[in-house]
Image (cartoon, rainbow, N blue to C red):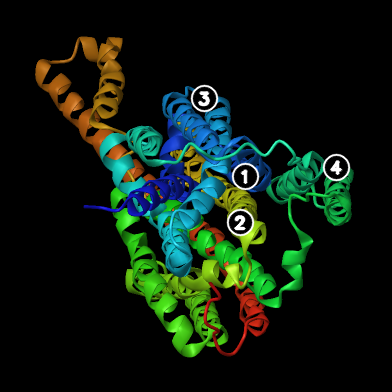
């Protein structure tokens, strides 16, 4: 029969799975949500950002609330909030309600995630602690990586609302399991204090920084508002560090950062998260919008990265004690760097090239994220151990938040330029066509709509339909009503009617062919422009992958046996 500790860890893994899944499950469904809620990508990106920013900002303070009021009780409240937020998101009627629902979800996740780690670790004997940490840590990376694949399948068969509503049955299972198996004897630590100042300061830091990254292009990087937000973010961060150094019970014990390996784990978590989520947040939209693939097929096309994480996360955990932290993290960093090198140079029309990049990035991320939770734990015990896991969880969310903000804002700026160039090209091309002014206006209206929706892969339809052609023929036959033809013999009238029909048919065919040729040329150029808009962020990001490689030297050459 299954041990109680195993049952508890299973419930905690469900909680972690839900929290981390919803950091990336929306990515594949963004085009469908954008159409369904009639919104733009920049506005919709806040449904992603609000989740990761609030999750990152509130994880540690709400973890402290759980310490004070009882982890079991607070954990159930967190599950209930997460379920409520999922329902609000799944039933929303506009993007603003979706953002509210995601905010409620994030409040629940900020409770569930740290409590899951603490409850799971404390449910096993000391000699099994490392194994429990590794299992819970692998679940974090795996759930985030599986998000786009699961999201694509659910969106294809159940619609985009299903990616939120599918959380509800899992929440109910976890809720019932926790009621049955969690210990309710946790003492209330009335003497513990919440670091409200630290929580507020880190939230201001993250919110202002994310706002800069998301709106920098729209508001202007040198505008007073953006510069003011940058200054506010920097000032809040400095004040936060000072506050944490002087309060009795800090939200983030600065003692953690005296450990070189913990610093390396923090940096590696943030950077690897940025580069992994960068792949997951843009490519699904590229496959569905630019290459006109279904959400399910786009999800399958992303799957190689998820598969590699599933394979390499446990392998890297096993190799950690054999090869040492430095070699393991170095190999993972090198693989991610190689993946971005391929990604920045590939021809996305050849899927096998993308598959190679996805395999390298997924394998690298799995190699890094598998042992990172254990490495972050180091030799910490007691509250420092709990804090180390919460802080690493925060850094994981910071990496996700930064990736969404950086890559989505870069893509939005690139798409704006691509749309402007393509629309200018379309107007110039259509203006040169030897067709009527009305046909030019109709053609531009269709092309403009497709460009606005980034629908560059949609087939070019015949502009003048059969029904329109019949109306043109009927209008042209009005010549038969002229007095000169009214008195003409029937044979003459029939001949004139055939000539009019033939002339209109030939003219329509020529007009259609000219429009189709022009539209095809515009589509080819616009597809190239939009493809470059999607690929450009990866080209810019490639040099920064070197930072991930440099974090390797924060880790020890050889592993040490865990102190129990």
**Residue 481 at x, y = what percent?**
27, 11
Circle 1 — which element? helix
Circle 3 — which element? loop
Distance between the Cα atoms at labels 2 and 3? Answer: 39 Å
Residue on which the image places disc 1: 63
**Residue 406 at x, y = what percent?**
64, 56
Distance between the Cα atoms at labels 2 and 4? Answer: 38 Å
Q: Nearer the viewer, mark 2 or mark 4?
A: 2
Q: Are marks 2 and 1 in contact (CB under 8 Å)?
A: yes
Residue on which the image places disc 4: 225
**Residue 46 at x, y = what percent?**
60, 39
- The crowd level at tag 1 (other Cα within 10 Å; few <14, some 14-19, many 20+) is many
| Viewer-nearest residue: 84 or 33 | 84
Distance between the Cα atoms at labels 2 and 1? Answer: 9 Å
Circle 4 — which element? helix
**Residue 363 at x, y = what percent?**
42, 74
Q: Are marks 3 and 4 in contact (CB under 8 Å)?
A: no
* Image height of 133 relative to 332, above or below: above
Q: Nearer the viewer, mark 1 or mark 3?
A: 1
Image quadrant in which you'd find residue 31: top left
Q: Nearer the viewer, mark 2 or mark 3?
A: 2
* Image height of 57 relative to 166, above or below: below
Q: Residue at x 37, y 32 (%)?
A: 168
Q: Is residue 296 visible?
A: yes
Q: Which mark is residue 386?
A: 2
């Amino acid at each position: 029969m299954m041990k109680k500790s195993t049952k508890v860890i299973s419930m905690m893994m469900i909680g972690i799975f839900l929290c981390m899944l919803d950091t990336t499950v929306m990515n594949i469904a963004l085009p469908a949500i954008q159409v369904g809620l009639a919104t733009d990508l920049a506005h919709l990106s806040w449904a992603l950002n609000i989740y990761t920013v609030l999750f990152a900002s509130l994880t540690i303070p709400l973890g402290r609330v759980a310490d004070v009021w009882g982890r079991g009780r607070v954990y159930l409240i967190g599950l209930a909030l997460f379920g409520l937020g999922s329902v609000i998101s799944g039933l929303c009627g506009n993007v603003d309600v979706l953002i509210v629902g995601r905010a409620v979800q994030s409040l629940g996740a900020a409770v569930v995630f740290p409590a899951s780690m603490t409850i799971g670790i404390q449910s096993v004997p000391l000699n099994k602690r490392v194994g429990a940490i590794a299992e819970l840590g692998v679940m974090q990376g795996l759930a985030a990586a599986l998000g786009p694949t699961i999201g694509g399948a659910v969106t294809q068969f159940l619609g985009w609302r299903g990616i939120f509503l599918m959380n509800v049955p899992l929440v109910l299972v976890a809720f019932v399991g926790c009621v049955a198996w969690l210990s309710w004897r946790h003492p209330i630590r009335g003497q513990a204090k919440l670091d409200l100042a630290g929580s507020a300061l880190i939230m201001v830091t993250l919110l202002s920084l994310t706002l800069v990254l998301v709106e920098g292009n729209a508001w202007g990087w040198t505008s007073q508002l953006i510069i003011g937000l940058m200054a506010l973010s920097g000032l809040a961060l400095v004040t936060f560090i000072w506050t944490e150094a002087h309060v009795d019970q800090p939200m983030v014990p600065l003692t953690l950062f005296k450990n070189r390996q913990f610093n390396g784990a923090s940096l590696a978590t943030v950077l690897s998260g940025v580069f992994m989520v960068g792949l997951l947040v843009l490519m699904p939209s590229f496959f569905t919008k630019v290459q006109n693939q279904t959400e399910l097929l786009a999800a399958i096309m992303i799957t190689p990265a998820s598969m590699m994480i599933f394979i390499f996360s446990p392998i890297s955990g096993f190799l950690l004690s054999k090869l040492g932290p430095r070699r393991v993290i170095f190999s993972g960093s090198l693989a991610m760097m190689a993946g971005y090198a391929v990604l920045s140079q590939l021809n996305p029309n050849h899927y096998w090239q993308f598959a190679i990049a996805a395999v390298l990035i997924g394998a690298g991320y799995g190699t890094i994220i598998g042992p990172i939770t254990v490495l972050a734990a180091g030799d910490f015990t007691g509250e420092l151990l709990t804090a180390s896991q919460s802080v690493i969880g925060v850094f994981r969310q910071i990496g996700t938040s930064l990736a969404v903000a950086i890559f989505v804002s870069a893509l939005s700026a690139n798409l704006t330029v691509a749309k402007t160039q393509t629309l200018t090209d379309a107007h110039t091309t259509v203006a040169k066509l030897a067709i009527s002014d009305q046909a030019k206006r109709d053609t531009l209206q269709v092309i403009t709509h497709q460009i606005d929706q980034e629908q560059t892969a949609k087939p070019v339809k015949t502009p003048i339909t059969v029904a329109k052609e019949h109306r043109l023929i009927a209008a042209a036959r009005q010549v038969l009503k002229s007095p000169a033809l009214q008195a003409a013999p029937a044979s003459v009238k029939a001949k004139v009617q055939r000539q009019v029909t033939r002339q209109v048919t030939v003219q329509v065919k020529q007009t259609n062919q000219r429009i189709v040729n022009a539209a095809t040329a515009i589509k080819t150029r616009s597809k190239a422009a939009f493809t470059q808009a999607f690929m450009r962020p990866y080209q810019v990001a490639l040099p920064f992958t070197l930072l991930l490689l440099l974090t390797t030297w924060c880790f020890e050459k050889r592993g040490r046996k865990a102190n129990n």
